[in-house]
Amino acid sequence: MSPGVSITGAAQVLRPPEDGLAFMRHDRAGELSAEPGSVAFEGDRIAGFEPDPTAVWQIDAQGCAVIPGFVDCHTHLPFAGWRAEEYEMKVTGVPYEEIARAGGGIRASARALARASDDAILAQARALAAEMLAHGTTTFEGKSGYGLSVEAELRLLGLAGRLAEGVPQPTATTALLAHAVPDGYDADGWMEAVAAMVPEVARATRATALDIYVESIGFTNQHLRRMGELASAHGLDLRTHVEQFNSHRSIPVALEVGARSVDHLSCLHPDDIGPLAAADCAAVLLPGAEFMGNEHVPPARELVEAGALCVLATDANPGTSPIVSMPLVIGLAVRRYGWNVLEALLAATLNAAWVLRASTDTGSLEVGKRADILLLDGPLEHIPYRLGHNPVAIAFLGGEPVWVRPDCAWRVAG
């Protein structure tokens, strides 16, 4: 347990308008405050917002901003290897759907997973988690989905459990059992195999959610409805990959079956903005994947103005978004969506924590919450403005200073 810590004299401390909010709809993002102040914590919890001269660790925050740690609620860790050759194909004009149908994409990652040892997969994932932490991600989710067989999916979920035990950040696990149709199956046949697998997934793995990819190269809205029924029957949340390359009008189905989130949304139909904004369902936007794949830009400004529960995530994966930096994702969102920095930070903290059912414990600066806190090297507005710069000077995880940037070590005394 950490001794007392006092972060003193910050130029900005990002606070919610009131304590106890599970999430905030995005038309309220302007109610976040970023006033000068201090933060004190005792053990692994936030204790107050006044300096504590008795704390063992004294942090000089002059000129800095203090914010909650980033929550990355959509990644594909752990996975094996990379797919740089596919990126070169895409930037020279080959569509992702064509790459996937030719045996690339998810199938290429499944082959890499089959060839790799457990130790190699975990070593890569732990290294990526450390890079994420250095860029301020203090909680993250990981998905299966690169197995493409019952045995391999269960192996990957087991590896996700081992990863959770081997990284400092709290993690959540999602069983993306319907990511692609494996060889030897059609989509209906694989969904039958998924249905048979779900009881073991719910009983014997860390997975708290199921996920499905609805697309011309994946599954249909009928399969989405079936996955929602499976999730409900086994006490799991439903996450979804929808409206990425084409509009399939998946949102009404996802809302009907109680999806916790709808992710991607590059091709979101205008008629679905209102119903989504009115629902307790997160719109998880993935600007890294959109940028790397030259995808359509989702109607993110319209979602904000409609009062949707908006979220940002990296979609960290070896193919479409080999990005682990939440500050970079925030910068892309501000530029491409026309969001301001408060809208982007809400989407990367409290609302992202809600997707993982973690917002009672993290995602905002409140007395009693876990001290998962970032000290930035400048004001909030510099996160998107200095695109590509890592603004994290110090990252605290459960009250411990787990990352201190060498040029900012002078700020720490004790």
Image: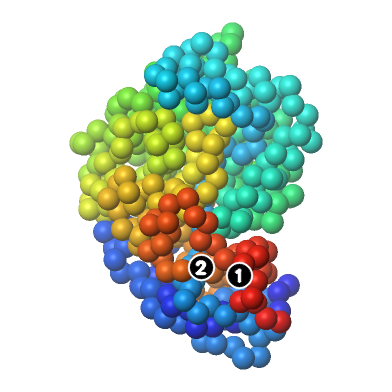
Label 2, on which residue?
Answer: 377
Quadrant housing residue 33: bottom left
Q: Residue at x 48, y 73 (%)?
A: 64
User: Along the line of sight, which residue is nearer the eye, 253 or 261?
Assistant: 261
Residue projecting furthest to the bottom: 53
Left or right, 280 with reference to 139: left
Task: From the top left corner, tell me how far across and down residue 88 is, in percent.
Answer: 49, 23
Task: From the top left corner, tell me how far across and down residue 145 is, in percent.
Answer: 58, 29
**Mark 1: amino acid:** Cys
Task: From the top left corner, tell me how far across and down residue 194 is, in percent.
Answer: 57, 24
Which part of the image, by quadrant, shows the C terminus?
Answer: bottom right
- Can residue 199 be seen in this snapshot? no
Residue projecting furthest to the left: 271
Q: Residue at x 56, y 27 (%)?
A: 84
Spatial CA span between label 1 and label 2: 8 Å
Q: Residue at x 43, y 52 (%)?
A: 387
**Secondary structure of residue under mark 2:** loop
User: Along the line of sight, which residue is nearer the eye, 186 or 147?
Assistant: 147
Quadrant housing residue 234: top right
Label 1, on which residue?
Answer: 408
